[in-house]
Image (cartoon, coloured by chain):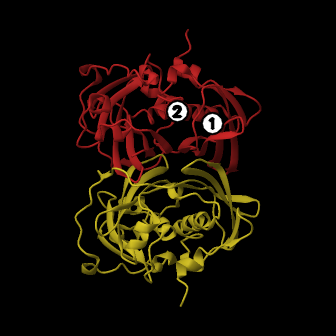
Chain colours: A red, B yellow
Amino acid sequence: MTTHVLDLAIALEAQGDDLYHGHTSAAYANMIGPFGGATAATVMQALMRHPQRLGEVVALTLNYAGPVADGAFIIATRIVRTNRSTQHWYIELRQGAEVALTATAVTATRRDTWGDTELRFPGVVPPAAIAPMPPVPWAAWTKNYDMRFMRGGPEGLPTDGSGSADSLSHLWIRDEPPRPLDFASLTAICDAFFPRLFLRRPKMVPIGTVSLTIYFHADSVALTAQGTDAVLAVAQGQHFGQGYFDQSAQIWSRSGVPLATTHQVVYYKD
Amino acid sequence: MTTHVLDLAIALEAQGDDLYHGHTSAAYANMIGPFGGATAATVMQALMRHPQRLGEVVALTLNYAGPVADGAFIIATRIVRTNRSTQHWYIELRQGAEVALTATAVTATRRDTWGDTELRFPGVVPPAAIAPMPPVPWAAWTKNYDMRFMRGGPEGLPTDGSGSADSLSHLWIRDEPPRPLDFASLTAICDAFFPRLFLRRPKMVPIGTVSLTIYFHADSVALTAQGTDAVLAVAQGQHFGQGYFDQSAQIWSRSGVPLATTHQVVYYKD
């Protein structure tokens, strides 16, 4: 059996409970440095590997503090507080003396309760009815995803010289080759949206996520039940101004169950 | 001149650059412990007071790790990394040996750029046309706000024995007595929404925010320009299940400029 390219990218070697050694993956390279979603998934993997973790991740916030250089890094985890059903974490990804990423997480044991979804599952056509997007040459990581856009696809990217009236995207997305969904792959998918700015404005400028938050609405049982099926990803920019914009997004199962909601704020130049 | 009740609540005594002594305020008491928005505003105040801060806050995430007891606390700040135009922070609020709150922040110097708002400013009636909500007896902090609901108001709260079809609220809100808007008061307002669950389900259960993220779209110049005017606050729950729900919200100026977008995930029992 071949190890999946994502599992190679997020592989960690533990040194005690709170220190994990990892290495960037050429397969998940972005224009500069690694795809932020792969970095996020590696942080999630450290949490999943941790022998003292209570429950599963409910909230994860990642702050991209500086560029991650190609090569080795360490992830240092710290359990700040453990309660009866929740646990609070602070995490750093470091390269040498520099902190490249800070993160906080809340893990929790979850129980069945009353529930409801107020978000609306958008009208969709099945993945099989849509052609997958060809990988983007300047973003190597895109070849590890099967993305099928219903709206807000790469036709709006600056390489095509046009801009869209809004930054709303609907797409089916799954790992390529197919891989069963888990917390790590879902985390990466939460950052797999093209910058909303590029959909709006046909101009290539320096850009980068500074803070990303994910709220997980599914537990590992529900994620495992997804198998290798594509998930529906919906994202839209909310406000752009003074060098920063924010994006809100949702990841849905094919049957219309929300798996995660995720938000980020992104720096851009000009 | 009398010091405003919010300024008394968020007052800090500095001990060096990175340690701030504070005290909970009876005026901002909630059912149990202090109103989370007052705690959040105090963390913001530590950032605003910090002599080495670069720029203004773009992103702030607060994780409520455990109850804050009435009494003294310290806020310990740490600058994790300073770049050319951004700075990354890790912050803890502690009482004795316990960490009650962790936070990360990104501050940045901002410049004028292309901008646009995709969020839609909802139709509103002016604050003067709506009666202010009477303070909620079991939530002392509510008497420090003038809240005027256009929809999703306290008529949906469990004390009235009814539930709403959705958890969407539109309200005008300002400090009471009036106080010029700044980063601290805006931070508190971002957590001044009644739990979305209570609007949906007429049942009082233990509940508490575990993680709150705020993206600031305005700088201090824009906030100062608001003066003591009410801001429009919009909030809605997205998904409720397995003991946690998430909420997305926006804070707007009266003229329809987004000041902040904010998200949180909330624990609830049953």
| x, y percent for residue A32 | 50, 30
Task: Report the residue marked by disc 2.
Answer: A183
* Residue A264 in view in this figure: no
User: Sequence order check: which comes first, mark 2 or mark 1?
Assistant: 1
Residue at 65% across, 42% down: A91
Q: Could you say where residue A161 lies in the image, as x and y percent from the top left?
A: 26, 32
Residue A250 falls left or right of residue B56? left
Which residue type carries mark 2? Phe
**Which quadrant of the structure image shows residue A151?**
top left
Q: Secondary structure at mark 1?
A: helix
Residue found 53% across the figure and 18% down from its top: A5
Q: Are marks 2 and 1 in contact (CB under 8 Å)?
A: yes
What residue is shown at x 32% (from left), y 59% (from top)?
B168
The total number of labels drawn is 2
How far is disc 2 from disc 1 in space, using C-alphas? Answer: 10 Å
- Quick one: label 2, few (<14), some, or many (20+) residues within 10 Å? many
| Residue B153 x, y percent position in the rendering | 34, 69
Side (left or right) of B29 relative to B147: right
Q: Chain of mark 2?
A: A
- The chain holding disc 1 is A
Q: Nearer the viewer, residue A251 or B179?
A: B179
Q: Nearer the viewer, residue A223 or B61?
A: B61
Seen in the picture, residue B86 relative to B39 is either above or below; the reply is: above
Comparing B93 with A183, the one in front is: B93
Residue beneath label 1, please? Answer: A47
Q: Secondary structure at mark 2?
A: helix
State the image coordinates of residue B112 (x, y, percent, origin top left).
Answer: 39, 55
How would you rate the neighbour count of disc 1 (Cα within 10 Å): few for under 14, some for 14-19, many for 20 or more? many
**Location of residue B259 (image quadrant):** bottom left
